[in-house]
Amino acid sequence: MRRFSDNAMRLEGQKMFQVLARTKELERQGREIIHFEIGDPDHDTPEHIVDAVYDSLRKGCTHYTTSSGLVEYREVAAEVTNRSRGFKPNINQILVTPGANVQIFYAVACAVNPGEEVIISDPAFVSYNSIIRFLGVRPVKVPLYENNQFRLDPADVEKAITNKTRMIIINSPHNPTGSVMTEEEMKRIYEIADKHDLYLVSDEVYARMIYKDAVTRFSSPSRYDHCKVRTIVVHSFSKSYAMTGWRIGAVTGPEDIIAKMGLLLETTTSCVSPFIQEAAISALTGSQRPIDDMVEQFRMRRDLIVEGLNSLPGISCIKPQGAFYTFPNIKGTGLASEQFANLLLEKAGVAVCPGNYFGEHGEGYVRFCYANSIENINKGIEKMREVLKTR
């Protein structure tokens, strides 16, 4: 009997979760581990959001709801889009989903045929490649370069387009590098997608996390077509609202593709829990002060970890503009990315994610998530210093 489908054999998963599983096992064995490997804010979900869930549960909001999501949530999401991106989508352009990963899956599954191509950056968030390959689609990878602050170059994107290209996926602020595209770069990417009649998926999960000292401000290609023609905006509450475990988000796009994505959600998930959706409403309508404070704390931690990494032998690190990741160059250590990560974990109890997990152009780099305490950042830097001095 054949054990697996061809699709199953192409599955890769998210390797940072595999690193996390390894660190959790080491902790069960009594090891102290400092976690820089997983993109999970160390803050608790703001209290008013938690209270909204309690209230919703007590009201009995524990049954099925419409697959597309609560009308109240989609109306609030449309208002927030109007304030943040300058246009108000109608609610049939918005689909409520369990987090953002599945939004990428639904978009590719509903818009791209097996054998066609999707352009992504290299390095890129690991799920893009895994989803694309699982669906029998070909990922076409456009390199990012440190000397360009890891920003996606529109000229490189256009060179990668063939007659099989169906979609471009962009991500700003960027995981794993923390880069932020300029408004001009964003506009040019949209013009390229428009010229070649392609879908443009804009992963804006970290949109709230651009630092006040960043040289660029947030921009979205959705401003050019209001998500009516080709732009699909990916969004979730995981990072900016410290809600990674809640699994809630909403995707905005052209009505026809959103309708198909909704049918796929209906087929695979039925609906998103209504009490979680009410928490999302509370997140969007309640005080944003906890979010602003959290982002400011991340900015201070970024400055601390960048300074610390640049003080280590063989390591150099540019300052990211957004998200909560650094992507230091470790080529001066003479170690490959996985060798470096294994050395830190085994000898220092410091967990990081090898850069090659995010693509071949991530080799020679590692990703640090600095959503951790100042105490742990300082401790982690000193542990790394000792290991790198004595290896």
Image: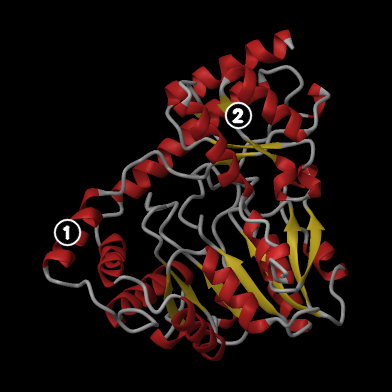
The image quadrant that residue 303 belongs to is top right
Question: Which residue lies most toward the front here?
Answer: 1
- 134 over 113 or under it: above or below: above
Q: Residues within 10 Å of mark 1 (few under 14, many from 20)?
A: few
Who's the residue at 80% across and 47% down the image? 361
Which residue type carries mark 2? Answer: Val
Q: Which mark is residue 368?
A: none
Which residue type carries mark 1? Answer: Tyr
Task: Answer left or right for 119 relative to 325.
Answer: right
Q: Which residue is mark 1?
A: 54
Question: Which residue lies most toward the bottom here?
Answer: 256
Q: Residues within 10 Å of mark 2 (few under 14, many from 20)?
A: many
The image quadrant that residue 7 belongs to is bottom right
Q: Quadrant of the C terminus?
A: top right
Q: Which callout, 2 or 1, points at the residue further toward the start of the chain?
A: 1
Q: Nearer the viewer, mark 2 or mark 1?
A: 1
Question: Which residue lies most toward the top here?
Answer: 390
Who's the residue at 44% across and 25% down the image? 374
Could one spot residue 321 in this view of the protein? no
The image quadrant that residue 199 belongs to is bottom right
- Disc 2 element: helix
Picture coordinates of residue 322 (x, y %)? 55, 47
- 146 over 236 or under it: above or below: above
Q: Which residue is mark 2?
A: 306
Q: Nearer the viewer, residue 119 or 209?
A: 119
Q: Nearer the viewer, residue 104 or 193?
A: 104
Picture coordinates of residue 28 (x, y %)? 45, 28
- Disc 1 element: helix
Who's the residue at 59% across and 69% down the image? 104
How far is disc 2 from disc 1 in space, using C-alphas? 40 Å
